[in-house]
Image: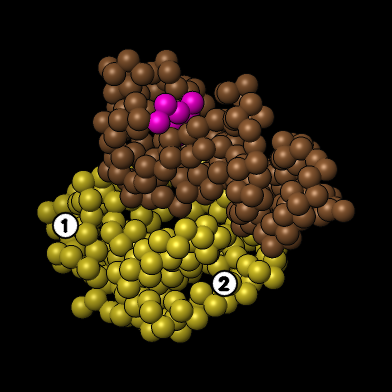
Amino acid sequence: MANLQNLYDAVLGGNLNLAVSTTKEAIAEGNIKPQEIIDNYMIKAMEEIGARFETGKAFVPNLLMSARAMKGSLDLIKPLLKNGDIKPMGKIVIGTVEGDLHDIGKNLVSSMFEGCGFDVINLGVNVSGEKFVEAIKEHNPDIICMSALLTTTMNYMKEVISALEVAGLRNKVKIMVGGAPVSQAYADQIGADGYSDNANAAVALARLLLA
Amino acid sequence: MNEIEIPFSELNITLADIYEAMGYKGNVPELEIVLQTQELMKVASVRVKPSYYYRKIFGQLVLNKIDIEDVCLNVGGTIARLLKNSSQYACFVATAGHEFELWNAEIRKKNEWIEIFIVDSIGTCIAEKAGDFLELQLEKEIGNLKHTNRFSPGYCDWHLIEQVKLFSLLPLRVCNITITESSLMYPIKSISGIIGIGESVKEKVYSCNVCKKKDCFRRKPMNQLKVILK
């Protein structure tokens, strides 16, 4: 019988191979509902690694390893979920704003979102307001996330929000912002719905915004 | 002087430097991360060609501004105080170089986020260590004169848009670096700035204790900061 505590430990420790093999075993046995595997073991493990990160007991690579293990298992489980069984985490469009080419932070956040079960459309870097608008029309996301690493580019976030307002889309999505020069005060100033300063907090904030 | 390529081995980058850049704060990473970092550093040592350039120019500090040639750098109050008594300024760039960017682009295509994060951290270390190397060369050149820490646009009150003015004091496309409309340097893993030179300037604790970003993951505790009074 599959030891699902191994799955918890594998996601927590970032062990992709163990996560995948335990998940395969559990699926083959069919004794537990896929959604229970996700809720009771995988998400619990991600919550624990997130808590450790917040208290300085885990680091960015630990988050990435756990997200990788979780995604490996999720990829096996998702096809088994019937439409009615799926508890959607949410869909996110993410990008670094126009004029800025930095993407490591944005990609870490993207990776954590994926690992935690969100659908993520990553628009890349140097993304214009127009592209954000097009992406919202095409993908109908719950949240858009904007990143900027420069004081010279962070102001473009406001332009994106204005573009969404002009297109009549502002009230259809939540807006999250992040990046080194960005702060909660800046997020409030430009009318974003939330700000986070790390990948783990971004996931927690997204869950909160969609609750 | 001309731009100088730095032999990778002379950067003296340690694995501990990379782990620090990754945010480990003195902790030892998991074996997987250690092994991967070691392997990637081997690749970096072969592929990456860091370089630097600096130019010493006489200038005058007036309040928060430095007049250098026909350029006025508005460095702000914090940096101006730390540049006090400088008579010359070394305007510099140091970069991990285009070879790093090419390697980084290849890694990113693989979509393996842990590897991408490690390589990004290596790039950060290369650029900073190239800056350290540059400072050592400057020290040799100025002999008995003293120098300050290095200061960059985008830090403290020195606005990033001043990068354009700084680059106007340097040769065009120095070290093959270009700047975008938003004042971003490309290759991204590059640093630029000035170093004050004079008979009685001081290299002081600078970055972390005066920076306003208290939640920066790179922020070092006071007891880890280098204090060299020259």
Q: Can you identify the residue that label 1 sits on?
A: B168
Label 1: chain letter: B
Taking depth in this image into account, of B24 and A170 the one nearest to the observer is A170
Residues drawn in magenta: A139-145
Taking depth in this image into account, of B226 and B117 the one nearest to the observer is B117
Label 2: chain letter: B
Query: Considering the numbered disc 1 on the image, is that residue within a helix, a strand or a loop?
Result: helix
Please rate how many residues cluster around mark 1, counting C-alpha atoms within 10 Å: few if below 14, some from 14 to 19, many from 20.
few
* Left or right, B93 with reference to A41: left
Chain letter, brown: A
Q: Can you identify the residue that label 2 sits on?
A: B37
Disc number placed over residue B160 in the picture, else none:
none
| Residue found at x 59% / y 63% | B20
Taking depth in this image into account, of B10 and B202 the one nearest to the observer is B10
Please rate how many residues cluster around mark 2, counting C-alpha atoms within 10 Å: few if below 14, some from 14 to 19, many from 20.
many
Q: Residue A141 lies in magenta, yes or no?
A: yes
Give me the C-alpha separation between circle 1 and circle 2. 38 Å
| Residue found at x 30% / y 69% | B98
Q: Position of residue A111 (x, y in %)?
A: 54, 48
Q: Residue A2 lies in magenta, yes or no?
A: no
Q: Position of residue B198 (x, y in %)?
A: 34, 66
The amino acid pointed to by label 1 is Ser
Classify residue B143 by image quadrant: bottom left
